[in-house]
Amino acid sequence: MNNSLHRSLVLTAWIAGVFCLLVCAVIIRGHFTAATNDPWKSPRLLALKDQLAAEPKNKPLQTEIRRLDLEFRRNFRHRLALDKTAGWLLVGGALVLVLAAGKAASVSTKFQPPQPKTGAAELAAKLASRARWSLAGLGLVVAGAALMCSYHLTSALPADEADWQKLASKSGPEQAPAQAAPALSESQANWPRFRGWDGSGVSTNAGASAWDSTNGAPILWRSAIPAPGHNSPIVWGDRVFISGGTASRREVFSYSASSGALLWRRAIENVPGSPPKFPEIPDDTGYAASTMAADGQRAYAIFGNGDLAAVNFDGSVAWTKYLGPLKNSYGYATSLAVWGNNLLVQLDQGDSPTAGSKLISFQGASGRVLWERSRPVPASWATPIVIEAAGKTQIITLADPLVISYALQDGNELWRAHLLENEVVPSPIFVGGLLFVISPSSRLLALRPDGAGDVTTTRVAWTNDENVPDITSPVSNGDLVFTVSSGGVVTCVDAVSGKKIWEKDLGVSVEASPAILGGRLFILGQDGALMTFQAGREFRQIGQIQFSEKFLASPAFANGLVFLRGATNLYALGLAGANAPKQP
Amino acid sequence: MLRRLKFIGALGVMLLMALLVSAEQRFPPPDFENGYSLPSTSTPAARQLWLQYGDTAVFLAALGTAVWLIYKKRSRRGVFWLSLFSLAYFGFYRKGCICPIGSPQNIVYGLFNPGYAVPLTVLIFCFAPIVVALFGGRAFCAGVCPQGALQDLVLIKPIVVPPWLEHALGVVPYIFLGAGLICAGTGTGFLICRYDPFVPFFRLSGGTFILTFGAAFLLMGMFVGRPYCRFLCPYGGLLRVASLASKWRVRVTPDTCTQCRLCEQSCPFGAMREPPSPETNPKWLRAERKRLGWLLALLPVLILAGAWGGSKFSPTAAQLNPTVALAERYARQQIHPVEYGLMTPEALSLQRAADNPAAILTQAADLRRRFALACALFGGWVGLVIGVKLAALSVRPSRTDFEPDRGACFACARCFTACPNERVRLGLAPAAQGAEPL
């Protein structure tokens, strides 16, 4: 009776065991085939996505990706259901197995009365000896495993300090070529960033004074702009750079400064990490509101979706980076700044001081991050400037509520002042030892940039609250500071005392920042009126040229020419043949 | 009754395994094209302080109850029900965290990372079982540890592990403890928690590897009593050492041992030790003393050799650290560039490293320096553990009765009722079944 029961139980346990193994095999097979149906791992889907990145407008490809993605998700759900069923079958099988095996064990177990041991001493000695040898064996196994791991997992990191430094200075597979920073005089002769080399909006180019707007409309050339954008032109040698873009395509354009010919256009695409889709950006700002920057070798552009690109002067892409997604309700519009070999990106974003704003310094040649500093501010739209003051090279940044100065070398904060409010768009300028900043629609302030720590109450030279702009930046010739509000009211303030000297309502809407060239104040109305005034203590208009399109971008001055970006055209103005641009 | 409960326990384990099969695979979210952005991942808030203190109170109460059940009541049934409660509370309700097994890592991490303050609850969870073990053996393992309770539930037909293998594998927990502590000290991660085979069952979630690992232990646990506790648990190693010095110890019977050997069969964990043979050959004694002398002399050699080997192994071990691993990947990419797909974790991590290689490499260099010291200490520790164990195996025990090994005994109380004298004492058997000493 017991024998037959035991046999039956053993047989049942075997059948249940084999059944469990089969179910396990099904589950394991499902697990290992899952990779091919995983949208993150499927080679087929990944290849299609790569292809889509190259051809973003390929509709059939998009449809195929969607179909495949849906198919994978259905397969996944199916596999989940299968796993669930298999799991319950496994439970049933395991239950039978455990019950049958347990019962069989109890049926077969017979009580064995313990027997007195003979030769216990020899046995104990033998046991201890075996245990020592097995322990020695374990030690060897541990040492062998460590040796094998060391052999197979060799370190690729250099042992030598010099090689270590070399590796640290690399970026990407190839080391960026060593490059000397452009000379200051070279930068000053060009217009390498928003509002000129120092961001002041003042041209120091001697040849520029030859330009005269009183002789009618001296348009040297006009070229169509293929893509929308509110950024201002920048100039280096014979190159004029602008960027443009939409949600689907973002580009950099290079024109000949002398002829206006479009030399090349380069799409910025396949940026690592940049998603194919991103949140919409309001049309008023667009995807290319930030003005580019150049250092004589490369031109840099940043777009509203967070793509940052360095493009060589021959049109080839040097490097790209994705800095997004950018949290900015109006769209990102802060322009880039260059100083020496540094490319500076002020990436203010979000609605709170903890939303992830930061200032990043990149090595221009390689795109390597030299340093990065978090900023305790929400989104802003002002462009940073670099100044030499108090024996230091400082980066001046504005955002509600802080003016913060950082050391260019390492990004360490030098000083800060709680002076700003509202949505900060106007950029700072530094003229005659004073820093002029605008708290939008509130105050124009003059600061001495030589403090440390919190200088809110100690470094403000003066404030002026008359006709304070909310968008445009100030401009100064060192003696006077000029501002122009969005409603077109020009105000002249004494740079030393902050007292208003004169004001004039021009009756035009203005979004372009004013600029000074050869003693003339340039103001560009939205309606296309380019007005020039004497940059003096008395109001005097010198001339006016009327264009037939909308202007939002600020003017650029280089090589004796004035470059303007309209809604659809790029213009060069000047005396024909008077100042031939130099080749880069 | 107990056998039925074992079956129910085994069934429960299988059920959990089945549920986990569907829980381990995660699926990526769709690529939304309508501007919808997925909410950012957030970590759950820390458990409220009063609840943490509540857990601590429950833990201390369970520990006290275990001691009372083992020493005062001598009740296997009581210990069993307590272990079931602990499995439910500390295992499935508290999801295996916090538990004393991983707590030494918190303390070491706190020692080497000033920014981390070790919570009071962690200190209590870590030291209370050790203090109890110093006085009364491994009461924690018997009735409070959920990992132990789970293994006890699935134990169906225990087999005897050969003693030579038992002794050799007995040092593995100490090696694992050392590895776990150097990983914690260097900020690499909590290795002991990561490779706890039962926590995924408590949490109903886990990766394929750890689930397979846990399932293997449970399967093995059907035939080998508490394999994790005996051959891997690092905290068990600490309690083992503390128990060796315990003031009181578990005794099969408080009366006289009859040396009937019945208790030997009752212990599924091979912890019962018989008294050494009284017959002693003087030749053997001389040889044993000589061997012990040599092994004691070998001890510093093993420690130094281990330390040297550990320091040589440190560049490899450092790759366990995510920052060093990223630096290694970055360095390999400079030598042999590999094309990774768009937005793959590898590509994104490389992008992060390429953005600021100096920062990653500086951190990696610092970590490698820390690993060099930690691995030398670890190697020395492995040498010490093996050397001490070798020496211990050459020392004659001095017991006269059958009794549980102080370090190896889980204080589970199974052996109590196997003793005829204990059964008579408890009134489970007539006095005639008691036995006189042999």
Image (tube, coloured by chain):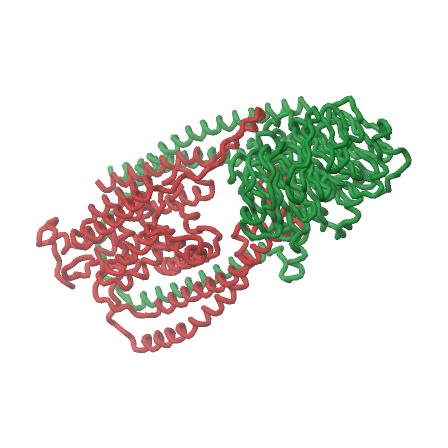
Chain colours: A green, B red
Query: Quadrant of residue A81 in the image?
Result: top left
Q: Is there any visible trace of residue B335 in the rendered image?
A: no
Q: Is there any visible trace of residue A516 in the rendered image?
A: yes
Query: Quadrant of residue A547 in the image?
Result: top right
The answer to whether B259 appears left or right of A578 in the picture is left
Residue placed farthest to the left in the image? B431
Please identify the quadrant where the N terminus of chain A is shown: top left
Q: Where is residue A125 in the image (x, y as percent from the top left)?
A: 33, 68
Q: Position of residue A300 (x, y in %)?
A: 72, 40
Q: How many labels does the image show?
A: 0
The answer to whether B14 appears left or right of B424 in the picture is right
Q: Between residues B2 and B299, which one lies in front from this camera angle?
A: B299
Please identify the quadrant where the C terminus of chain A is shown: top right
Residue at horizontal 64 percent and vertical 50 percent from the top: A394
Residue at horizontal 38 percent and vertical 35 percent from the top: A15
Q: Is residue A202 above or below residue B133?
A: above
Residue placed farthest to the right in the image? A577
The answer to whether A438 appears left or right of A134 in the picture is right
Q: In this view, does B186 lie above or below B20?
A: below
Q: Position of residue B378 (x, y in %)?
A: 46, 62
Q: In this view, does B436 lie above or below A26?
A: below
Query: Quadrant of residue B285 in the image?
Result: bottom left
The answer to whether B103 appears left or right of B378 in the picture is left
Residue at horizontal 27 percent and vertical 74 percent from the top: B280
Q: Between residues A328 and B180, which one lies in front from this camera angle?
A: A328
Q: Where is residue A575 in the image (x, y as percent from the top left)?
A: 88, 33
